[in-house]
Image (cartoon, helix red, strand yellow):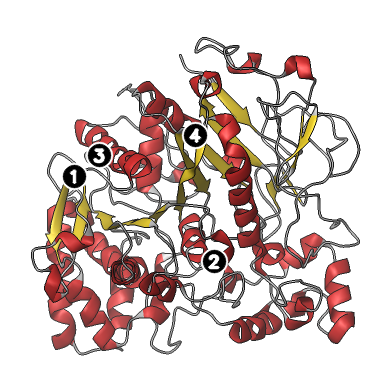
Amino acid sequence: MFSFFKVETPVCVLSPDSDNARIDLALRVAAVSSLLGAPKPGELSESSPLSALPPFDVLLEEAPNWGSEASLNSSPPSPSTAASTREGGGGGGGTGGGHIDASRAGPGCLPSPASAPFVVSEDCLTLDVYAPASALRSPNRASLPVVVYIFGGSLVSGCTSRSGPLDALVERASHDNRPFVLLAMNYRLGALGFAAVSELAEGDPRGTSGNYGFLDQILALQWARDNIAAFGGDPQQVTLMGHSSGGTSIFALLAAPAAQGLFHAALTLSGSPNVTMARSEKEEQDRALWLPGTGCAAKAGAELAQCLREADALTLQNALPQSYMEYSFDKSVPDLGKGSLGWSSLAFVDGVTIARPVHEALSSGVAGNVSVLFQNVQCENPPERGSEAYLATHLAKFATGKELDPVFSEYAALAKSYAPEDERSQYSAAALVADTSVTCGTVSLAAAAARGQAPGVFVGTVVRGASHAKRDLSCVGIAFSTQLPFHRFDLDLVLAWADARGSADVWQPPMWCPFKPSSVDVQLAEDLWGHWLHFILQGRPQVSWADVRQSEAASNGAYSHALLGGTDSGGTVNVVDWKLFVCSSMEEMGIGQPYWWIN
């Protein structure tokens, strides 16, 4: 049995090495109980129950003075300078002495729209740390690799406590004698995290506005640099890992000057590769689409900025229209009339926090000496039966049937290899849309990273879904079942496998219904986790997943693409230039970067 030192809920963190009740690091570090309650090397054993560990807590920033009078904090987060007076893990921020029970998760940040099935608060910038108990006993604590996990949710929803059993990954790795430390942070979402208008830039030391959520993530990375050694982590071996908009965040951080040197590898799962909107376009967009719902649109200049800062937080979050939160098969289909997906962007290139588009950062080498692994699934948005005709109708606006037929044939062959017979048409349609919205973009980013001489560059796609039975999605509000590899299928498969602790009876994925796995499911989960863990520990996946530059024809521009689940048993195979034909064909038809996912 393995115990974990779990840091949760707002306020402060106790350094186990400290002989003082309070010490200053990059953040104020304070004991949350007393010196006598502080664990010391050798006091924790692998048989210690989690409940026996003393409570610890982390505050990422002094609680912004949002509330009803100042709900839009249009400035970067700042380190805390005082401990909280809260008791029991609830309430708002404050100053003064006191301590807090850190045995339960802190609230998530307010989502957009402002409703959620979990506890949320404006006072939400907390982080969780999971570490093997042995890491605290080791005399040389700063030795284990560190994973900084960024949750997804289209940058409008989510929190660390709803990310699934991340501790199961730490436990599984420790059980296999390949331990690491994991940190996960909350960050501001929706309008409070990303809205930008020029008037708010006046009070921001950056001289711009928006992208506050990315600043929160950078602050968490700075905290890890300064404090993670106290929990057994090596600040010089940090891997970012994120799914969906967590992956999008990683793309943004690769282009963030303040994040350089704070992480050394990046693992993205189905991230949106289109972080390209310029500041002027973003401010114009938010002024036209978001501002009218805030109640402040009639004001200008300093009065507008003051109105937004005094507006109710729920009003600001609910003012975001649906175009900022699109996510469906139909909304991912290229539309010639729009010239893009027509989605509204939260993340953008402000020239300061995100200095340039990520493909420029990668190709120029300014992203630093960072190895990258870009992964997605082949059917990000499985359509309901009948949606294939919708796709064909829209694509016919871009090209003739003669031009489209070879592309459709490629996807029909792919579906025949990896989809059950009754879902081949849906697989083919979903695969095409996944490529135009995600896969082609990540292949392009991988090529940019290779040009920028990144030490390791790996790109792969999960091609196989459930092996023997349709996955029931009704428990998460989706009215159909599928065997296709849908969005988050890969992450939830691995989390369910790790959480089952080797049992093959019934697995409970975080975001879909319980199921009984087959041997192929087990093999695919083990193969995926093997690749991720090897990348975390050594900067490259297992040998069966080749670097994009390891193709025999790499000198002529060819690349290597891993098909995850590509073998009958659920293993990995590499194919040279696997997506070159379909991606280049789409590009020639005019279906390129404007149709990649955002947010």
Q: Residues within 10 Å of mark 4 (few under 14, many from 20)?
A: many
Earlier sequence position, callout 3 versus callout 4 = 4
- The amino acid type of the residue labelled 3 equals Asp
Earlier sequence position, callout 4 versus callout 1 = 4
Q: Residues within 10 Å of mark 2 (few under 14, many from 20)?
A: many
> Is disc 2 placed on a helix, strand or loop?
loop
> Is disc 3 placed on a helix, strand or loop?
helix
Q: Which residue is mark 1?
A: 543
- The amino acid type of the residue labelled 1 equals Val
Instruction: Give me the disc on residue 527.
Output: 3
Q: Is residue 396 visible?
A: no
Q: Which residue is mark 2?
A: 256
Q: Residues within 10 Å of mark 3 (few under 14, many from 20)?
A: many
Whole-Å distance between the Cαs marked 1 and 3? 11 Å
Q: Residues within 10 Å of mark 1 (few under 14, many from 20)?
A: few
Whole-Å distance between the Cαs marked 4 and 2? 24 Å
Instruction: Specify the quadrant of the image occupied by residue 364.
Output: bottom left
Q: Position of residue 357 (x, y in %)?
A: 47, 75
Q: Is residue 194 above or below residue 304?
A: above
